Amino acid sequence: GIVDDYLSSRWFRKSIKERYRIDIKEVKTMAETARHNDQIKEVFVEFGDNLTEILVPIIEEFQPQSIVFGGNISNASDLYLNKLRNTLAQRRLDVKVNVSGDTEKMSLIGCTKLYEQEVWDRIKGQVQMV
């Protein structure tokens, strides 16, 4: 399948709706619900399993120094990142796993760094690195 089918807010919404017949539209609300509802929390644990299954082979292949998560789903990282961190530790893969605080801003900054070196050179001193 397509990675986005397993690592997106659409996946969360579909999974929760199919399993529990609850229609929650926003990931923030899903995360708040999961923090006091074990059934919804299970969906986040499964998301962590999906994330780990997809990322670990990529990490093994490319051996990055760090991975930074962003986007709205990253605001619920306390509910799903433990699986990835534990698996990385078990496999002795030395990779920092970070979550960006201002996810929208950091995504734009990351794109700028990749594609427009001149703009990056002008703003890099103003950016707090993760």
Image (cartoon, helix red, strand yellow):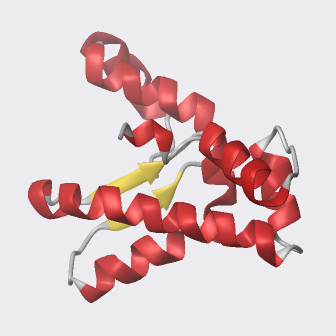
Q: Can residue 15 be seen in this view?
A: yes
Q: Which quadrant holds the N terminus? A: top left
Q: Residue at x 66, y 64 (%)?
A: 43
Question: Residue 14's x, y, as percent?
Answer: 69, 44
- Furthest residue toward left: 61
Instruction: Specify the quadrant of the image occupied by residue 19.
Output: bottom right
Image location of residue 40, percent across then percent down = 78, 66
Determine whether 94 is above or below 19 in the image. Answer: below
Residue at (74, 51) in percent of width and height: 18
Q: Quadrant of residue 52?
A: bottom left
Residue that lies at the very extreme toward the bottom in this rendered image: 90
Compared across the picture, whether 15 is left or right of 122 comes to right
Which residue is depicted at the point 34% across and 80% down?
A: 87
Name the residue at 21% across, 75% down.
Answer: 93
| Image location of residue 89, percent across then percent down | 31, 84
How many dots with numbers? 0
Decide if residue 39 is on the left or right side of residue 10: right
- Asked whether 108 or 2 is in front, the reply is 2
Query: Is residue 10 or residue 119 the one in the foreground?
Result: 10
